[in-house]
Amino acid sequence: MRRPFPAPAALACLLLVLATAPDVLRAELAVVDDAGRTVRLARPARRIVSLAPHVTELLFAAGAGPYVVAVSEHSDYPPPARSLPRIGGGAGLDLERILAL
């Protein structure tokens, strides 16, 4: 029989996350891309280009919609994505336009 997660433990976890959030928002970000290169950002991204419709939907669902500055050709949901600039799609991306953003 599974025991439910105790409410005090859940509250403690939530408080821990909230207490460290400001530091995370200012922290350097480093990721390794598919080619094995390390990409470093001094702070979290403030401009996001979505390269696929499902990514656009996920970004908006996660609350990052205000940071999305361009989307792929077929990104039509949620409705605010329809008014964003298009940067191409599966047939090819307009790299110059992406870099200009």
Image: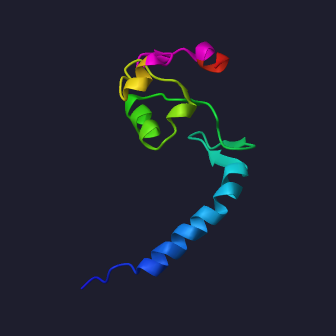
Q: Magenta span has 89?
A: yes
Occupied quadrant, residue 45: top right
Residue 80, horizontal then vertical, whole percent: 43, 25
Q: Nearer the viewer, residue 15 or 86?
A: 15
Q: Residue at x 46, y 44 (%)?
A: 62
Q: Is residue 23 left or right of residue 2?
A: right
Q: Position of residue 14 (x, y in %)?
A: 52, 68
- 91 lies above or below 16: above
Q: Nearer the viewer, residue 96 or 67?
A: 67
Query: Quick one: quadrant of the C terminus?
Result: top right
Q: Residue at x 62, y 46 (%)?
A: 32
| Residue at figure coordinates x 72%, y 50% from the top left | 26
Viewer-closest of 10 and 3: 10
Q: Quadrant of the N terminus?
A: bottom left
The coloring applied to the image is: rainbow
Q: Which residues are magenta?
A: 83-97
| Residue 44, image quadrant | top right
Q: Is residue 79 left or right of residue 11?
A: left
- In the rendered image of this protein, does residue 66 appear above or below residue 101? below
Q: Is residue 96 above or below residue 34?
A: above
Who's the residue at 71% across and 57% down the image? 23
Q: How many marks?
A: 0
Which residue sits furthest right?
42
Q: Nearer the viewer, residue 94 or 24?
A: 24
Residue 89: percent from left, percent from top: 43, 19
Residue 90 locus on image (x, y percent): 40, 21
Q: In this image, 55 relative to 49: left or right?
A: left
Residue at the extreme left of the image, as rendered = 1
Quarter of the rendering containing residue 95: top right
